[in-house]
Amino acid sequence: MSQGKNSTQVYIAGKVYTVEGYEEEDYLQKVAAYINTRISDLKQSGNFLRQGVDFFHVMVELNITDDYFKVRRHADQLEKKLDELEKELYGLKHDLVSAQMKLEKQEQETKEWQSISEEMAEQVEELKLKAGIGPKAGQNAGESPDAGQGQNADHGQETENGTMENVPKENHENSNGPESE
């Protein structure tokens, strides 16, 4: 949808001009104000007032053109910096994706190793049961074979200082002393 031209009156260098443009009226007024500022700056310097009006207008045009080229150069530098930053960002995103892929691979390997470890632990328990090393039937895992049972002579004897000491079974079978033949 094409927007029509806007027409407005602006004040430049003491004269009123009617200008038209596709930009908004506020923008056209800002342009006129900028021109007036540059004219005012040159008049304050005093050097150009002795010259003719044409020379003065050329100097205003040169100053405005100078401003334009400086802003254009700055914009070009910013665009160049933006391109560099976009390239750096692309590289960082690539590095991030690579790191995420490595992390996912490591997590998968960790899960596999955990699964293998759990399987091996189960196999060790099965082998212990087959060998008669594991917990006895009816006994909870992690509970010692003597848990819940009182201390008896078959398992140990309390010493004078209150510690337990293992005493072989044959010493308890005959408490009257050594057997004679």
Image (cartoon, helix red, strand yellow):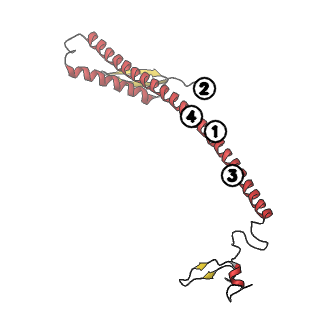
Q: In the drawing, what numbered circle is on residue 114? A: 3
The amino acid type of the residue labelled 2 equals Met
- From the image, which quarter does the C terminus lie in? bottom right
Label 1 or label 3, whichever comes before in sequence order: 1
- Residue at x 43%, y 28% (from the top left corner): 27
Identified at 45% across, 26% down, the residue is: 81
Residue where numbered disc 1 is placed = 101
Viewer-nearest residue: 63 or 104? 104
Left or right position of 38 against 157: left
- Position of 156 with respect to 13 (left or right) is right
Alpha carbon distance from label 4 to label 1 = 10 Å
Mark 3, other Cα within 10 Å: few <14 / some 14–19 / many ≥20: few
Residue 95's mark? 4
Query: What's the distance in space between the residues labelled 1 and 3, CA to CA?
Result: 20 Å
Q: Amino acid at mark 3?
A: Gln
On the image, the x and y values in percent for residue 78 come to 43, 26
Q: Considering the numbered disc 1 on the image, is that residue within a helix, a strand or a loop?
A: helix
Compare residues 29 and 80 and report the one nearer the observer. Answer: 80
Cα distance between the residues tagged 2 and 1: 48 Å
